[in-house]
Image: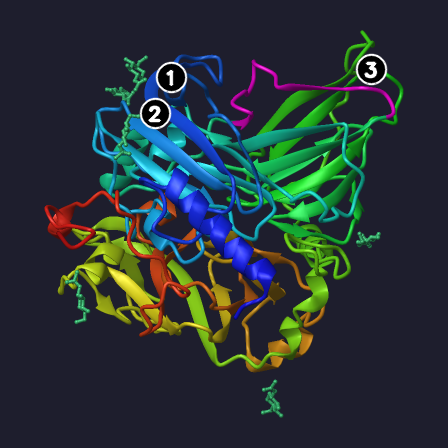
Amino acid sequence: MPPLKLRLAALRLLFTVVVTCSLFCDIAKADDPYRFFTWNVTYGDIYPLGVRQQGILINGQFPGPDIYSVTNDNLIINVFNSLDEPFLLSWNGVQNRRNSYVDGVYGTTCPIPPGKNYTYILQVKDQIGSFYYFPSLAFHKAAGGFGGIRILSRPLIPVPFPDPSGDFTLLIGDWYKFNHTDLKAILDKGHKLPFPDGILINGRGPPNTASLTFEQGKTYRLRISNVGLQNSLNFRIQGHKLKLVEVEGTHTVQNTYSSVDVHAGQSLSVLVTADQTPQDYYIVVNTRFTDPVLTTTGILHYANSNHPVSDPIPGGPTIEIEWSLNQARSIRTNLTASGPRPNPQGSYHYGMINTTRTIRLANSAGQVNGKQRYAVNSVSFVPADTPLKLADFFNISGVYRVNSISSSPTGGGIYLDTSVLQADYRAFIEIVFENNEDIIQSWHLDGYAFFVVGMDGGQWTSASRDQYNLRDAIFRSTTQVYPKSWTAIYIALDNVGMWNLRTEFWARQYLGQQFYLKVYTASTSLRDEYPIPKNALLCGRASGRHTRPL
Ligand SMILES: *[C@@H]1O[C@H](CO)[C@@H](O)[C@H](O)[C@H]1NC(C)=O
Ligand SMILES: *[C@@H]1O[C@H](CO)[C@@H](O)[C@H](O)[C@H]1NC(C)=O
Ligand SMILES: *[C@@H]1O[C@H](CO)[C@@H](O)[C@H](O)[C@H]1NC(C)=O
Ligand SMILES: *[C@@H]1O[C@H](CO)[C@@H](O)[C@H](O)[C@H]1NC(C)=O
Ligand SMILES: *[C@@H]1O[C@H](CO)[C@@H](O)[C@H](O)[C@H]1NC(C)=O
Ligand SMILES: *[C@@H]1O[C@H](CO)[C@@H](O)[C@H](O)[C@H]1NC(C)=O
């Protein structure tokens, strides 16, 4: 007989299931609170760089509304697609544990047809921190449709800093005056993406100005995400220090920086104290590793002050790689702080676990049939006619081949395929990203966070392991790889599903620099993977089938 407490919990669970679960749960997560969202996705006029553009709005907003949640909440997001083309939202950094069906990328989830709606049922399980959502199809991300996601700690689980007086989302990113269909057409014709026109802070670039208001003496949290299409960005505030406290769900060692690099797709939180003379200060964001350098300023305003900003705009790093690498190495996990659970983040000793497999991934660029493509281990991904996850569920053969991408660089020319790499559930693996190109790279894995154990210039060899950080490496979901350099990560494959591994350089992602990591088990237990959602959209060769037996 289970202990009384457990039996009561089971009863309560049953009760909640009966009361609240018509659509949402044939899975035992009903004990946790629900948050409901209704979103209408439309086109609308926006003027981020002072000229009119057609933006993708959510409930009339650009950027879209923030999602506020608490660890373990169920998010029920009913998305109405009022665009004239298929649309999908994905959740950068949200792990969707045991449930890759709702990941919102085309390999796992069918697009929402124009004029239709679809209800995402997500659980933000065992995560805290700062993330964002974005539109994953076509080149929609260049038009908006993105917004912040914050997952707060449950009450009673300590956060390693005092409650800030305010908590702001800052979405920064490069931006084009071309609209998303024009940018997509450039890529479809086989060209590279041109240089962007500006940088936005919360949807505003010159001549518009984003602004924040602080009260003298108080401390604020800024959740900064780079939602742009490719450029690494440096963020700073004139006269103020940035205390780094969180990176993509991990509480960091609280180092203080005068500026921070945020690479494409990355998120982090800093604390800023309004400890200077009351006046306005510049918030500055500039592109890294580019020539020319694009810069945008916003304003940090002290309440009760009417002193304008004083020039000059403070300078920051621009092309220096070493500076960025040193900062990256200084970003570490605070081992004694709690994460989403009460136990300290350092209680999982990743450095003591033997890896069972090494996967080496090299990015490349080149032409296929006279058109620009980008590849991983020589394979340039092409979408199949059916989401891969649905092909698996319905046993539809011929959609993709397992291990259609090699687990180390082949050195051969680029070719097209629907690349899927299979790995075993519960394996503990090492992935080495090898960047032999002279651009900076940024890689993201859905469904997971990983330990960034090392990065350095030159070619990775097994001797590079000697310099790995096996103690307090940062645990995140997006990592940069410097030009002609490597980055190594460790991952515990504890989340069954079909997970997109992609570059965050959106043109490269669109032109094939991505694949799916299929984390496989023969088990069909609900403890390992949830069933396909009852309401899953079906498309391609899965059209007309049924998610449940009739
Ligand atoms: C979405 O917005 C459009 C434009 O404002 C409107 O016509 C449509 O009725 C809205 N749909 C929903 C479901 O609210
Ligand atoms: C993008 O701009 C082109 C003109 O350059 C226009 O034909 C097209 O309709 C626009 N697309 C959207 C989605 O605004
Ligand atoms: C579409 O929206 C309606 C009205 O809110 C809702 O009842 C229905 O379940 C939604 N459909 C899907 C597939 O989510
Ligand atoms: C790590 O977190 C602990 C526990 O909250 C805190 O007391 C300590 O100051 C933090 N250490 C650093 C270096 O940030
Ligand atoms: C890891 O591998 C080493 C060397 O093969 C072995 O001595 C050690 O016991 C292994 N550790 C674990 C935790 O399996
Ligand atoms: C797919 O094949 C497996 C194994 O043969 C079987 O158990 C399962 O019921 C099949 N699924 C569908 C939807 O037909």
Kindly indicate the quadrant of the structure image that contains residue 261.
Answer: top right
- Earlier residue among tags 3 and 2: 2
Image quadrant of ligand 5 equals bottom right
Q: How is the image coloured?
A: rainbow
Q: Is residue 174 above or below residue 131?
A: above
Position of 461 relative to 452 (above/below): below
Q: Percent from the top left, x then y, of residue 315?
A: 73, 33
Pointer 2: what residue?
179
The local crowd at label 1, few if under 14, some if 14 to 19, many if 20 or more residues have their Cα within 10 Å, is: some
Q: Identify residue for label 1.
A: 53
Magenta-tinted stretch: 199-217
Marks 2 and 1 in Cβ contact (< 8 Å): yes
Identify the residue position indicated by label 3 in the image. Answer: 279
On screen, residue 250 versus residue 86, left or right, reads: right
Query: Where is 121 relative to 57, above or below?
Result: below
Task: Point out the tag, 3 or 1, that comes first from the N-terminus.
Answer: 1
Is residue 242 shown above or below 527? above
Q: Where residue 103 sits: x, y (%)? A: 37, 48
Q: CA distance from mark 3 to mark 2?
A: 37 Å
Q: Is mark 1 within 8 Å of ligand 2?
A: yes
Separation (CA) of disc 3 from disc 1: 34 Å
In depth, the one of 474 and 336 nearer the eye is: 336
